[in-house]
Structures are given as C-alpha cells and as structure tokens.
Amino acid sequence: MMTQSVKGKTKEEAEKIFHRFHDLVTGHSHEAEAELGKLAVFSGVSEFPVRVKCATLAWHTLQAALDGQQEKISTE
C-alpha cells in the first residue's frame, strides 16, 4: 500500500505522505485520514502502540532511502 501511495510522487510529496501516515498511526492527528485515502485503514494502529513500529518500518525505510542513508534502519 505504501508503494502504491508514493508511486509517481516527488520526493517532497512522498515525505509529506510519510509524515501524515506517521501522525495518523501514532495518534497525533486524525485530520490526515481523508488525505491518505486507503491508508486511513491504519488509523486503528494508534490504539496498539506495539504495532506502530510494524506499521511504520517500511515507511522509515523509504524515508532513509530518500535521504540516501546506508545505515541500518530503526523505528526508534
């Protein structure tokens, strides 16, 4: 779902989606649900903090790739 969401987007657009998704699953903002389309189904993840890391690992990996990082990726 992440790949489909960022496919064809600019780096800035992909980063914006990442931040909105991260805010959604961490419970910091539910305003982004409408903007995230199908990704809004992950809004319930915020009720299970242990699952936030699972839901965001691919996103953190994407962010690291966009930043050109070579180090091991962490959700910490």
Image (spheres, rainbow, N blue to C red):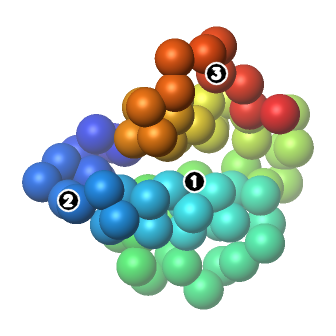
For this orientation, the residue located farthest to the bottom is 31
**Quarter of the rendering containing residue 17:** bottom left
Q: Which amino acid, mark 3?
A: Ile
Q: In screen coordinates, is 17 left or right of 42? A: left
| Separation (CA) of disc 3 from disc 2 | 22 Å
Q: Which numbered circle lies on residue 42?
A: 1
Q: Quadrant of the N terminus?
A: top left
Q: Which numbered circle lies on residue 9?
A: 2
Q: Rate crowding at label 2 as few (under 14), some (14 to 19) or many (20 or more) other CA atoms within 10 Å.
A: few
- Which of the two residues, 65 or 27, is positioned nearer the viewer here? 65
Q: Earlier in the sequence, mark 1 or mark 3?
A: 1
Q: Which amino acid, mark 2?
A: Lys
Q: Which amino acid, mark 1?
A: Phe
Q: Earlier in the sequence, mark 3 or mark 2?
A: 2
Q: Quadrant of the C terminus?
A: top right
Residue 74 location in percent, x, y?
72, 25
Residue 25's place in the image compared with 1, above or below, is below
